[in-house]
Image (cartoon, grey):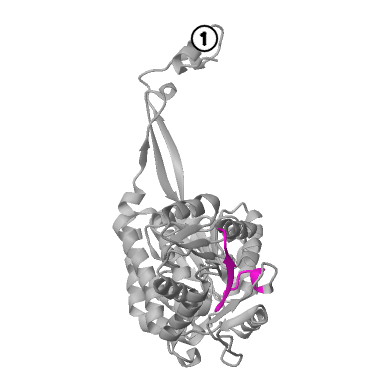
Amino acid sequence: MIFQLSISDTIRKQRKFFQSGTTKDFAFRLVQLKALKQAIIQHQTDITHALLADLNRAEVETYGTEILLILSEIDYAIKNLKQWMQPQKLATNIQQLPASAHIYPEPLGIALIIGPWNYPFQLTLSPLVGAIAAGNCAIIKPSELASNCSKVIAEIITKSFASEYITVVEGGVDTSQQLLADKFDHIFFTGGTAIGKIVMEAAAKHLTPVTLELGGKSPCIVDADVNIECTAQRIIWGKFLNAGQTCVAPDYLLVNKNIKPQLLTALQKSIKEFYGDNPAKSPDYGRIINHKHFDRLVKFLQDGHICIGGESNKIECYIAPTVIDNISLTSAVMQSEIFGPILPIIEYGDIDKAITIINSQPKPLAVYLFSQDKKLQQRILQNTSSGGVCINDTVMQAAASGLPFGGVGDSGIGRYHGKTSFETFSHYKTVLQRSFLFDIKLRYAPYKGKLQWLKRIVGSNI
């Protein structure tokens, strides 16, 4: 960990270390990935305790959504790193012959990774896997809102890496502003759209490329021809995981009116099965990160008709798993991403209405569809735009290392996971190598009489 006053000095030291070429070596990158993996394994108990303190996160949930996903990303990178680093051979056109063309992946330099508070380990350290694999140095800024997690991240990184290679800067808004005032070679930010705009504005002053992993109102369509019990379980799991504080959680339901009563019954049954008669006493149900976010969410409980849940306790930052009916597009709960355990329901009779509602909102991070109708599946894929789509499940599309993850429009810029993490933190340098064996004189002046010959060679009819 470094202090605010030494941020610029640390960046200079990292740039000097990067320019030494050490990070570009395959063996070096491999060793660092293995060191990160070992450090996470050794600190599993600390990670679990930190998430319990910050978010009341259950151990199983912590392992499944944080530790396991990071370890899977590291293993995937270790397995494929040598292949990712290989130059890619490309074909050349007739004008270039004799020649060879390749694309060489090279590291960008110094990366700034700004992590969020909702999944503070996985969403902060997963981008780091890509930065290491691609051969970069990195400065990590964990979220100060998850203070216990921030301390553990700092401990893991400090013990595992030299500060001139990878380091952690802890602090609040002032620290973030100081970091963003400096020049980096890439900024990777995970968080809300409003802060994402600030990050992008700061990056533009240095022409720094950005990856913005944001969020949005991810809709969940429930068609009539579904297994209602299974659908309800998957919706409840994805929505109330981490007390709804998940960027890809279903934000609102668009339900076929013919099955709405049965679905509501199934949703209530699933909540009871997962969290008992009183979720406030369940060891498996989380809490809102702080009172500020609690107060924002409680205001949404004034909308519509609460048909499930609705209880809250400010002292404990507790809001029960809540389902709200009789919601309109003008309701406050539909004006921004909820990011909490409140699930509005809007019914539809014609699927065109559901599609129109989705397309009236900014492009979301995910669209969910529960349907066995292949034609409907294709229709949703073709007529809506989102970072990703998951059919007959929720959230799981974000858990696969081989699948690129990212938003579009207001929900984000760029993507990562697996090879795309490597690509995000790499520049693909084009290299053309010519031979001295032949040198066609057509390209050289004087040009008189050469145009027709040039057209014949390239096959032009113009």
Task: Measuring from the top left, give residue 22's x and y in whole percent.
Answer: 39, 56
Which is more toward the observer, 18 or 132?
A: 132
Task: Measuring from the top left, give residue 201's x and y in whole percent.
Answer: 66, 58
Whether residue 275 appears in magenta in the rendering, the answer is no
Residue shown at 61%/72% (left/top)? 175
- Which quarter of the rendered picture does the C terminus lie within? top right
Instruction: Using residue 198 as the reference point, say whether residue 251 is left or right of it.
Output: left
Task: Measuring from the top left, give residue 42's x and y in whole percent.
Answer: 33, 79
- Residue type, label 1: Gln
Q: Secondary structure at mark 1?
A: helix
Q: Which of the 4 quarters of the picture holds residue 294?
A: bottom right
Say few, some or many: other residues with alpha carbon within 10 Å of mark 1 (under 14 / 14 to 19 / 20 or more): few
Asked whether residue 425 appears in the rendered view, the answer is: no
Residue that extends furthest to the front in the rendered view of this protein: 258
In this view, 309 is above or below 458: below
**Which residue has dot 1 on it?**
452
Question: Which span of residues is magenta-colored?
Answer: 333-350
Whether residue 346 appears in magenta in the rendering, the answer is yes
In this view, 29 is above or below 68: above
Please count the marks in the image: 1
